[in-house]
Amino acid sequence: MRSHCLAVIAASLALAPPLAAQPSGIESTLDPGIEAPPPPALPDGYPTLAGTRWALVQFIRPDGSRLTPTDPARYTLAFDADGGVALQLDCNRANGSWSAEANGGLSLGALAGTRAMCADMALHDRILADAAEVRGYLVDEGHLWLALAPGGGIYEFAPMPAA
């Protein structure tokens, strides 16, 4: 249920609910002309992630500070229907597995990928380290929000057209 995922997100930021209104005040840095159809809904309203692609908008730390990529299209996340996940992390790529629950629970399996030295490795390294801490997701106003374990922060992604 949506309240479960919002509770995970709120706990992650160490904030008291309601958090539902917070995402609407954050603007995406993606080209507003990029449109992607919403993913189909599961019975309880959580959309399936299978077949979707997302570009990173920002990482919100527990203290409220934000880390944003210079080019969101260089940090992408794609969920395939067979349980595989593919990430573009600046000049590197990573692959792993994913599983979601109808109540908004989400987990990413171990990631394997390339380790070229990109211009700025901070966001690359952060995402790789945080992947195992993903606990839940929510799609709100077309954006994907990934909640980390409590106290870990939140990732916001904007939809991208299918590859």
Image: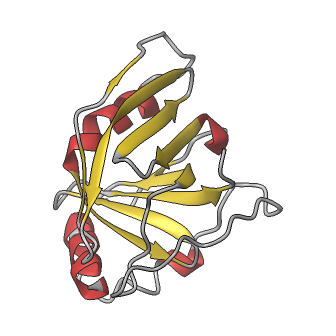
Residue furthest to the top in view is 116
**Quadrant where the image shows the N terminus:** bottom left
Residue furthest to the left in view is 150
Residue nearest the viewer, comparing 47 with 119: 47
Question: Looking at the picture, how far across and down is residue 54, in whole percent?
Answer: 56, 52
Q: Give above or below for 151 relative to 102.
A: above
Q: Quadrant of residue 100?
A: bottom left
Question: Looking at the picture, how far across and down is residue 96, in whole percent?
Answer: 32, 35
Q: Quadrant of residue 46?
A: bottom left
Q: Can I make out residue 91 in this image?
A: yes
Residue beneath the point at 30% across and 48% down: 98
Residue furthest to the right in view is 33
Residue beneath the point at 46% across and 80% down: 41
Q: Is residue 53 left or right of residue 146?
A: right
Q: Is residue 144 left or right of residue 128?
A: right
Residue nearest the viewer, comparing 138 with 122: 138
Q: Give above or below for 72 relative to 107.
A: above
Q: Is residue 30 left or right of residue 122?
A: right
Residue nearest the viewer, comparing 50 with 20: 50
**Quadrant where the image shows the C terminus:** top right
Question: Looking at the picture, how far across and down is residue 144, in whole percent?
Answer: 48, 64
Count of numbered marks: 0
Q: Give above or below for 24 relative to 77.
A: below
Q: Quadrant of residue 160?
A: bottom right
Residue beneath the point at 45% across and 58% down: 50
Question: Looking at the picture, how far across and down is residue 47, in whole percent?
Answer: 44, 74
Q: Give above or below for 141 relative to 136.
A: below
Residue beneath the point at 50% across and 46% down: 78
Q: Can I make out residue 15 in this image?
A: no
